[in-house]
Image: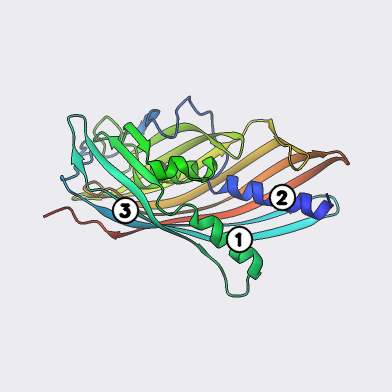
Amino acid sequence: MTRYSMMRGLVLACALLAFTGSKQSNTASDADSEDGNGVRLLDKGQRPRAELRYVIPAGTTTTSTTTFRVATLATSEDTAALTVLPGLRLDIVSGPAELTERGVKFAVDVVKSEAVVPEDFDEKMAELLRSGASIVDQVGGWVEVDNRGRMLAGEFNEQTKRSDVPVRLLRMIVNTRSTLTRVLLPAEPVGLGARWESRQDIKAYGFTVQQVNTYTLVDHVGDELMLNITVQQLAVPQSIEFPEEGIEISVESMTAEANGQIILKLNALESDASASGTAEDHILIKTTSGTETVHVHEEFQVQVANTSALPAE
């Protein structure tokens, strides 16, 4: 394997990891990205205060578009590789909502997935990316959540179970939803300026990453909340192997932070949101040829836009 191909493989691996969010945090508790636990209220905010709860009318269907973008620069002592991945755009339909004794149950389906490829992008690579993006078409499942956004139950559909969609990509979608579009709400009444944390451990491309989401309530009008969000992650020292490539990657440090804003709709199944951030990773690459130290700098963006959010009449 040439030094360039080794570097490019690392860049693509780290780019996929960056899609899950950002990295760096204070300690994170044992909360899973799919179970809705780990909310801690930091500041109750100003008076008057009120409970924040989702109230989803039966039959509600919400459609949205999620777009991911990432650029990664990996450098070693004598090599540099820059990868600017085209955007990945997912059109998602959630619903119709079915009321249950515990909350609300609804389907979540990716109805269209495509790579957003620039006109001057290498055609062979563009076709590969388009083919890879199309794998996500029609994947989905159902979830049941309570009025605080905590996941009670859920299952992927048969198409998802039969498909060759990478687990890391499914986790990327799930983590984006639980972080940006279905925010976990605090148990206590809060007012403007309130802050709370949602903590979880996630897995991405073989790495275990600790994540802390910090939300600040900026405005509250009717069924809409405006929230500022800071996402922090930390991957502790660990190693993963790529046997087919003859590579072992060891993490020395991974730190990053993302910031964004959410317009959270308490009567819809999706919300408008955007976040961007940077990450700094220091990694050791071991091959049969020796060991190399690599520094990875990442910049990434996630955008979620509601295309309809009207409850059933």
Colour approach in the figure? rainbow
Describe residue 98's horizontal placement relative to residue 217 as left or right. left
Residue 116, percent from left and from top: 51, 65
- Label 1 packing within 10 angstroms: few (<14), some (14-19), many (20+): few
Discs 2, 3 touching: Cβ within 8 Å: no
The amino acid type of the residue labelled 2 equals Gly
Is label 2 in contact with label 1 (beta carbons under 8 Å)? no
Of the pair 306 and 157, the residue shown nearer to us: 157
Q: In this view, which residue lies farthest toward the top?
A: 30
Residue with the mark numbered 2:
9
Distance CA(mark 2)–CA(mark 3): 33 Å
Q: Earlier in the sequence, mark 2 or mark 3?
A: 2
Q: Is residue 52 visible?
A: no
Q: CA distance from mark 2 to mark 1?
A: 15 Å
Q: Secondary structure at mark 1?
A: helix
Choose the circle earlier in sequence order: 1 or 3: 3
- Circle 2: is it few (<14), some (14-19), or many (20+) Cα within 10 Å? some
The residue that appears at 34% across and 37% down in the rendered structure is 184
Q: Quadrant of residue 216?
A: top left
Residue extending farthest to the bottom is 119
The amino acid type found where label 1 is placed reads Leu
Q: Which mark, residue 128?
A: 1
Disc 3 designates what residue? 93
Q: Residues within 10 Å of mark 3 (few under 14, many from 20)?
A: many
Question: Could you tell me residue 115's position as x and y percent?
Answer: 52, 62
Q: How many marks?
A: 3
Q: Which mark is residue 1?
A: none
Q: Nearer the viewer, mark 1 or mark 3?
A: 1
N-term-proximal mark, 2 vs 1:
2
